[in-house]
Amino acid sequence: MKKTTCDYSKLTSFILRVALAVPFLFAAIDATLQPEAWIGFMPLFFRNLLPEALLLVAFSLHQAGLTFWLLSGWKTKEAAVFAALTLLIITAANITVLEIVFRDIGLLLAAVALGVLHLKK
Amino acid sequence: MSTVFTASFMTLAIAGIVDAGYLVWKHYKNNAKPLVCPLDHDCSTVTESKWSHIFFFRNEVLGLLFYASMLAAGIIVFLAPEFILLKILIKLAAGGGLLFSLFLIWVQIYKIKDYCFYCMLSALITLLLFMNSLLL
């Protein structure tokens, strides 16, 4: 095998982007396949505002869009900010079930790390 | 429980489509920039080698078709969970895909003596797809 000069920041960025994109994509698909398992995580305020089915579809589309944005590598810093904000809202809205969403805090920090990694020097 | 595994199966299939799709897009797009490898490696040694065509098709095109058919099968499994024959076919297809991936890894190590990041990633996705197919 040839030896390569390896830039680990690119690999780190790639791993962080995949680490964030995959859970978003899974959540979007699973919420579409079995909405009854996910609607409970939607804040009551939004559930009173919009039909539950529409709310889940809209949020799934948001997450799917975020997935492809993260994977595209285009404006990664901005994608990381959007991902962090999404995870912050998910965590804050479901803080009463911390035993379920505590790992989202780790994902949130991963999004922050991705943003920091892409800050211009 | 099965629906969760259908969702994870579809997630992996889409990940595979993105991976193979990126390689197809880069190959067929005119004046495309070189592949962006997270390891800063020259993937074209592998992707443009004489082993890039098997069964008259480019490997990434075969991969794209494979992942797209897995996604379509996952959707059908969700819509018709009683379709047992399809679940068996998915397991066989995913197993075949895994064997093909192992063959391509062997080619990279012993024939080309180089590697491609996206090809290795595709092999990992296929392995996970196969494991997931056993849970459908």
Image (cartoon, rainbow, N blue to C red):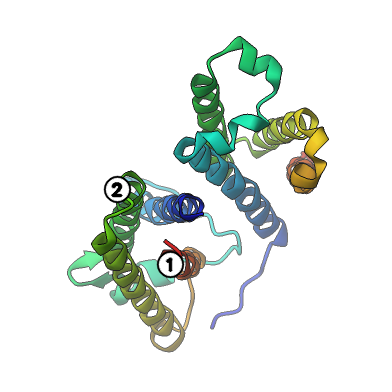
| Chain ID at mark 2 | B
Q: Is residue A37 left or right of residue B105?
A: right
Q: Nearer the viewer, residue A102 or B32?
A: A102
Q: Is residue B109 visible?
A: yes
Specify whether residue B34 is in view: no
- On the image, the x and y values in percent for residue B94 come to 35, 68
User: Percent from the top left, x then y, of residue A102?
Assistant: 80, 46
From the viewer's perspective, tell me whether residue B6 is left or right of residue B67: right
Quadrant of the drawing holding the C terminus of chain B: bottom left
Q: Regarding mark 1 in the picture, which secondary structure is present there?
A: helix
For label 2, the crowd category at 10 Å Cα-Cα, with few meaning under 14, some 14 to 19 and many 20 or more, is: few
Figure check: B129 above or below A68 = below
Which residue is drawn at the image coordinates 43% and 79% (left, top)?
B105
Total of numbered circles in the picture?
2
Kindly report which numbered mark, 2 or 1, lies closer to the viewer in this rendering. Answer: 2
Same subunit: marks 2 and 1: yes
Q: Amino acid at mark 1?
A: Thr
Residue found at the very far top of the displayed protein: A49
- Residue B126, numbered circle: 1
Q: Give the CA separation, mark 2 to mark 1.
A: 23 Å
- N-terminal of the pair, mark 2 or mark 1, is 2
> Residue drawn 49% across and 27% down?
A57
| Residue at the spot of label 2 | B80
Asked which secondary structure carries label 2, the reply is: loop
**Residue A40: image location, x then y, percent:** 64, 31
The residue at the far bottom in this view is: B110
Q: Nearer the viewer, residue B73 or A99?
A: A99
Left or right of A75, for residue B108: left
Image location (x, y in percent) of residue A73: 57, 43
| Mark sitting on residue B34 | none
Q: Residue B19's quadrant in the figure?
A: bottom left
Amino acid carrying mark 2 in the image = Ala
